[in-house]
Image (cartoon, grey):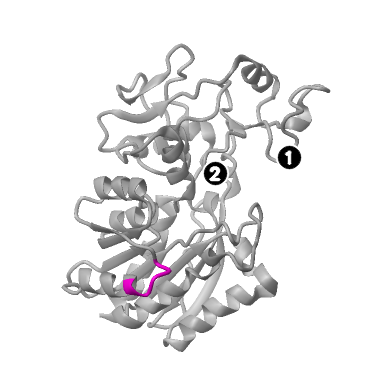
């Protein structure tokens, strides 16, 4: 049997499809509307094509069909923009991004894959009294897919980060059983196990490409380093001294509530001035808002540290300015979660052929 073929919609830098690729799938195409993310995608997916398309436009579906016409597409994966669904967003019912998932089903009508996988924030489930969730389910069922969904908690599968995301799976093969948990709470991968081997950058800003300075000290670090000869995208943010002074006062695992009275008043929301704990997974990696700090060093994590916490291997190179690199990392599906889902889907596909 040839490799199973995947199309990745709203691909971003390609974390989701990278997990599928690691599990032996052929990622035929990545589609996004952001050049910088597609540059990253193309570099890290050597055998894949890319298209910069606005998926609001109906002609985009025809363009994709023409691009992949030589392939049988087995799986469509998609992580539509979550801003319209997120608890931290405005939740505007007229936000046109809320309807972007419809392009997944429009493409499925044409390509007829055995599986559809849509990933998003859990807030989508309750958005507009559950209307969005029901629309996704009914759209899949109208095309003959058995629709299932579940919220997956990233640490349960070996990702060193507190991250909950809902996965919708449409299957032409029948009911889909989601992957079993691989890690219990006392065995979660911690921040120190994930990034403790990386240079502190206390006296240096760091470089986009540098040598490793220490040996790996955990199995996770060894896995992340596999195939990488250089340390990429490990560059420090240069904070102003008054910001460093506040960070220094935050205890490990603490936040703004642990600061002395009158200190750090510029940020008082829930996630403000949060320092990671070395022996726990990190908080959810966002797109670089600068509210989370290294468990030991008085700075925000570097792009590489965030990428490690998202389970991107060290050989995965990010392009663009540092701010855009952080957005790519924060928007991505952790590759380990992608791989876990891919392995489960592959089992169903193997049994069906």
Residue at 45% across, 53% down: 333
List x then y, in percent, for residue 251.
69, 24
Q: Which residues are magenta?
A: 55-59
Q: Is 169 left or right of 123, judged from the image as shown?
A: left
- The numbered dot on residue 120 is none
Q: Is 327 left or right of 108, judged from the image as shown?
A: right
List x then y, in percent, for residue 238.
51, 20
Callout 2 crowding tier (Cα within 10 Å): few <14, some 14–19, many ≥20: some
* Magenta highlight: main SS: loop
What residue sits right under mark 2 in the picture? 286
Between residue 23 and residue 330, name the one nearer to us: 330
Q: Quadrant of residue 63?
A: bottom left
Can residue 310 be seen in the rendering of this structure?
no
Callout 1 crowding tier (Cα within 10 Å): few <14, some 14–19, many ≥20: few
Q: Secondary structure at mark 2?
A: loop
Above or below, 46 against 219 in this view is: below
Residue at 68% across, 20% down: 246
- Identify the residue at the far right of this view: 261
The span from disc 1 to disc 2 (Cα, nearest Å) is 15 Å
Residue at 51% across, 30% down: 301
What residue sits right under mark 1 in the picture? 269
Above or below, 90 against 40 in this view is: below
Q: Quadrant of residue 152?
A: bottom right
Quarter in which the C terminus is drawn: bottom left
Q: Is 262 left or right of 273, judged from the image as shown?
A: right
């Amino acid at each position: 049997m040839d490799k199973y073929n995947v199309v990745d919609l709203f691909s971003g830098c390609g974390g989701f499809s990278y997990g599928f690729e690691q599990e032996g799938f052929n990622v035929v195409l990545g589609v996004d509307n952001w050049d910088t993310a597609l540059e990253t995608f193309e570099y890290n997916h050597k055998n894949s094509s890319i298209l910069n398309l606005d998926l609001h436009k109906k002609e985009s579906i025809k363009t994709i069909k023409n691009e992949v016409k030589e392939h049988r597409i087995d799986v469509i994966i998609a992580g539509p923009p979550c801003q319209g669904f997120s608890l931290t967003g405005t939740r505007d019912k007229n936000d046109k991004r809320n309807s972007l998932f419809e392009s997944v089903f429009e493409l499925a009508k044409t390509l007829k894959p055995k599986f559809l996988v849509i990933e998003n924030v859990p807030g989508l489930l309750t958005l507009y009294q559950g209307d969005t969730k029901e629309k996704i389910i009914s759209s899949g069922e109208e095309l003959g897919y058995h629709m299932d969904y579940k919220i997956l908690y990233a640490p349960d599968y070996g990702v060193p980060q507190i991250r909950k995301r809902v996965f919708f799976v449409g299957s032409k093969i029948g009911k889909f059983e989601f992957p079993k948990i691989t890690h219990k709470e006392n065995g979660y991968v911690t921040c120190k196990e994930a990034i403790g081997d990386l240079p502190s950058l206390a006296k240096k800003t760091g470089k986009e490409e540098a040598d490793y300075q220490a040996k790996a000290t955990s199995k996770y670090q060894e896995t992340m380093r596999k195939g990488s000869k250089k340390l990429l995208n490990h560059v420090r943010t240069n904070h102003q001294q008054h910001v460093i002074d506040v960070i220094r006062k935050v205890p490990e695992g603490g936040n703004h509530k642990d600061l002395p009275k009158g200190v750090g008043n510029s940020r008082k929301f829930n996630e403000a001035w949060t320092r990671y704990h070395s022996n726990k997974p990190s908080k959810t990696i966002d797109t670089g808002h600068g509210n989370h700090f290294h468990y030991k060093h008085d700075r925000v994590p570097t792009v590489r540290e965030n990428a490690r916490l998202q389970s991107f291997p060290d050989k995965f190179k990010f392009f663009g300015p540092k701010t855009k690199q952080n957005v790519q990392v924060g928007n991505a599906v952790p590759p380990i979660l992608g791989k876990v889902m891919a392995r489960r889907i592959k089992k169903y596909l193997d049994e069906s052929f």
